[in-house]
Image (tube, rainbow, N blue to C red):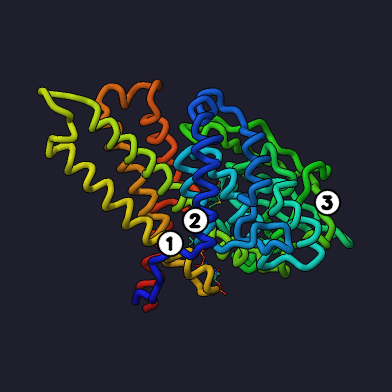
Amino acid sequence: MVRAMRFELTEEQTLVQEMARTFAEREVAPRARALDKEGSWPSDLVAKMGELGLLGVAVPSELGGAGADNVSYALAMEEIARACASTSVIMSVNNSLVCDPLLKYGNDDQKARFLAPLAAGEKLGCFGLTEPASGSDASSMDTVAEEDGDHWVINGSKNWITNGPHADVMIVFAAHDRGAGSKGTTAFLVEKGTPGFNPQPRDHKLGIHAAHSCTVFFEGCRVPKANQLGDKGMGFKIAMSTLDGGRVGIAAQALGIARAALEEAVAYAKERKAFGEPIANKQAIQFMLADMAMELDAARLLTLRAATLKDKGVRHSKESAMAKLMASEVATKVAHKNIQIHGGYGYSTEYDAERHYRDARITEIYEGTSEIQRIVIAANVLKG
Ligand code: CAA
């Protein structure tokens, strides 16, 4: 059943959206093509996002954040992603995958030591769940944690860690009891510089070139018990509930990529002439634009519904999965059609169309593949 939702944005949500749009158009968009080509980490943009409150949008202001809500966060993510998908996922990981679980599960000491500087942009975070041999089957991990006095000792490896090469803090999930499945997992906060915490050189990927990710090795990494996040054995639930929020962020990222592609398609269709008139006059092009616009709006409504439920504190696993699934598949479709409308120019690296196409693709994979989203949706539908 669809629960009631409002369609008007509040004044605060509009202000956050406009602030993010202004920053994105003035400072992020002009850099996006070069960042992609060079694969360079946008350290100055990350610092500026911190100053603007964009790295802790839904964290209360007394804890270093912007004190806004998750709808505002989704709106801001869409604006940043419309300008540069790489910059937006750096933002998304810090907000959704690091600040959010610290806010929900961190104790006062952890909030003071980790959340406040992360939300203020003084530190950057990353999230370590995926491993070389387990992505979708997240609870079957090989990374282990053993108790040793007032420390935990972590051994293993995590990979595809977005922000990994630059992060100051990583939330790591490790098995303290491998026989206990999802109940044998605990979460830890590991600081950069801890002996045995070894981030590797960055990965080379199809898209989001400026958002660096890497493998991280844990070799006898001693973490104080004060850095255990949540209770022993709660790690898997922390990871899953965190991903419920993260999927709203990735859905919003996909919306931004799709919106950029649609806007470019519209502009090009009005300007490009064929057979004596702009191609925008051709029904073949109009039908493509109609589908692109309709699907983008549908994905946005699902995304804002999931963000609204998160703000209400209601479990939103199904709604987040629907938003992420729909928005990511729409982003890929819209980016594909944008290339088609641009013809040969769409295939050229001199235009942004091919970048959107490459960047959109990852949204169907990270934070749960489309197949995993369908599993989550189906499980909820069958539960009734
Ligand atoms: N919130 C709270 N608890 C949850 C939950 C949620 N959303 N989902 C599951 N749980 C709980 C269940 O209630 C269950 O608890 P009980 O045993 O007490 O009943 C427990 O967790 C185990 O649940 P399941 O049996 O459903 O778990 P599963 O092993 O079958 O896995 C899955 C379910 C949906 C497939 C899950 O493994 C999954 O989401 N996999 C995908 C992982 C993923 O998204 N990885 C992305 C990595 S991060 C990333 O990509 C970052 C980046 O680079 C940007």
| Residue 221 rendering spot, x and y as whole percentages | 80, 48
Say which residue appears at 44% left-offset and 46% top-offset: 363
Q: CA distance from mark 1 to mark 3?
A: 41 Å
**Is label 2 in contact with label 1 (beta carbons under 8 Å)?**
yes
Q: Say which amino acid is labelled 1.
A: Leu
Residue 222 shown left or right of residue 183 in the figure:
right
Within 8 Å of ligand 1, the CB of disc 1? no
Say which residue appears at 61% left-offset and 52% top-offset: 129
| Circle nearer the N terminus (3, 2) | 2
Give the structural element (helix, strand or loop) at label 2.
helix
Q: Say which amino acid is labelled 2.
A: Ala
Q: Quadrant of the C terminus?
A: bottom left
Kindly indicate the quadrant of the structure image that contains residue 64.
Answer: bottom right
Residue named by callout 3: 222
Which of these two is toward me, 199 or 165?
165
**Is label 3 in contact with label 2 (beta carbons under 8 Å)?**
no
Residue 189 shown left or right of residue 384 in the figure:
right
Residue named by callout 1: 304
The relative height of residue 371 versus residue 163 in the rendered view (above or below) is: below
Residue named by callout 2: 74
Task: Return the mark for residue 283.
Answer: none
Q: CA distance from mark 3 to mark 2?
A: 36 Å
Residue 63 shown left or right of residue 334 in the figure:
right
Say which residue appears at 76% left-offset and 43% top-offset: 197
Farthest left residue in view: 275
| Circle nearer the N terminus (1, 3) | 3
